Image: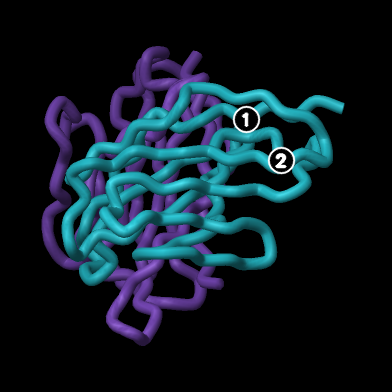
Amino acid sequence: LAKTTQPISMDSYEGQEVNITCSHNNIATNDYITWYQQFPSQGPRFIIQGYKTKVTNEVASLFIPADRKSSTLSLPRVSLSDTAVYYCLVASLYSSASKIIFGSGTRLSIRP
Amino acid sequence: GAVVSQHPSRVICKSGTSVKIECRSLDFQATTMFWYRQFPKQSLMLMATSNEGSKATYEQGVEKDKFLINHASLTLSTLTVTSAHPEDSSFYICSARVGTGQGETEAFFGQGTRLTVV
C-alpha cells in the first residue's frame, strides 16, 4: 500500500488559488490517485481522481507528473467554505476489495 | 454518484452497553464495505473490511470481539460496538466501492456516526 505524505496544514485567502502537493513515492502501476475533502463530523467527499497527466473537473484540477511519485491538487479561487481537511489517497481501483488507507491529510484554512 | 448511508448519525450510550451502527448502500450492491474510526483532529483509521457472506478482516490492533461486523446482504453492513467504554467514543465511518463500468471502482463514504459513551 503506497504511503502518502502531505503538508499538515495550509493557510490561504479567499479568491486565491491553492495548490496542495502530495508525495507517493511507492505508487504501484495499478494505483490511482484520489483526493477527498472532509468537513468536521462528516464523511469524506470525493473531489477528483486521476492516473497521470492532468485531470480537471468543475471544482478542482489534479496535476500528476510523468513519474507519478507526486500529485498536486489545485483549487481555483477558494472561498471560506473550502476550509476543510484534504486527503490524498493512492489505491488500486480495479478491485472493490482493495483497501483505502488514509494519510494525515492537509488542514486547509481559508481567511477572508 | 452512489450513496452510502449510515444510521444513526449520533448515538449516546451508557458504558457497558452495546451499540449497532448500520451502513447501507442505497443504489448499488457492495460485496465489500470498509469501517473506519476517526478521533478528533486525526485522520481516518481503517478498522476492518466487511465481506458479504463471510467473516470480516480486521486490521492489526482492532479487537474483533469488541467490534463485531456483519455483512448479511449486498446492501447492508453493521458494526456493533460491544460493552462500550468511554474510550470507544469516536466518529465511525463506513465506505463502499462501486464499479464505474469501465473496470475501475470508486469509493463512497457514509456521513459518519458520532458515538459517545458515558
Between A24 and B17, the one lying in front of the other is A24
| Residue A47 image point, x, y percent | 56, 56
Q: Is residue A12 left or right of residue B11?
A: right
Q: Chain of mark 1?
A: A
Q: Quadrant of residue B18?
A: top left
How many marks do you count on the picture? 2
- Viewer-side residue, B95 vs A39: A39
A53 relative to A19 in the view: left or right? left
Q: How is the image coloured?
A: by chain
- Residue A34, quarter of the rendered image: bottom left
Label ID, residue A82: 2
The letter of the cyan chain is A
What is the x, y in percent for residue B54? 12, 61
Residue at left 63%, top 37%?
A: A39
Which residue is denoted by mark 1 in the rendering?
A: A108
**Horizontal and vertical percent position of residue A57:** 62, 67
| Subunit of label 2 | A
Please tell me whether residue B61 is drawn above or below residue A44 in the rendered image: above
Give the color of chain B as drawn: purple
Q: Is residue A3 visible?
A: yes
